[in-house]
Amino acid sequence: MYNKILMKGAEMDPAFNLEILKHMLQRDMKERKFQHLSRKFIEWSYGPIQTSIYDLTSIDSCEENSALEILAYNCN
């Protein structure tokens, strides 16, 4: 039921991120209209092995120096 609510919300407002971090780590969205929820991009693949990257923009907040940005990009 939660997934249906999430997908319905994505249909209504594609720019709105609904608990995007939880879902991008747990699943691969195959349908094109729901791919922005996954935010997972395959960088390269060789046979059954693949490397994926995740778009981390706007997960925590839209402000500069958000908690996620500090953890991901600052090395202090």
Image (spheres, rainbow, N blue to C red):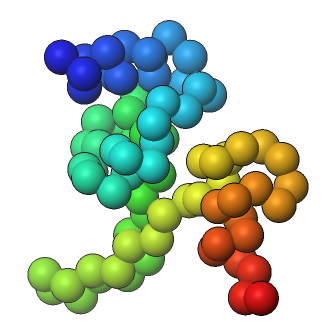
Q: Residue at the spot x=59%, y=26% of the render?
A: 16
Q: Is residue 16 visible?
A: yes
- Report the number of discs: 0
| Image quarter of the N terminus | top left
Q: Please, is residue 14 above or below residue 50 in the view?
A: above
| Image quarter of the C terminus | bottom right
Question: Which residue occupies the foreground of this view, 69 or 32?
Answer: 69
Residue 73: image location, x then y, percent: 71, 77
Q: Quadrant of residue 46?
A: bottom left
Which residue is at the far left?
48
Q: Please, is residue 74 above or below residue 22 in the view?
A: below
Q: Quadrant of residue 67?
A: bottom right
Residue 9: image location, x then y, percent: 44, 16
Q: Is residue 61 left or right of residue 63?
A: left
Residue 63: image location, x then y, percent: 83, 47
Question: Which residue occupies the foreground of this view, 19 or 48?
Answer: 19
Question: Which residue occupies the foreground of this view, 10 or 3?
Answer: 3
Q: Is residue 38 visible?
A: no
Q: Please, is residue 26 above or below residue 20 in the view?
A: below
Q: Quadrant of residue 8?
A: top left
Q: Is residue 20 left or right of residue 26?
A: right
Q: Residue at the spot x=71%, y=65% of the render?
A: 69
Residue 29: image location, x then y, percent: 29, 43
Q: Residue at the spot x=71%, y=44% of the render?
A: 61
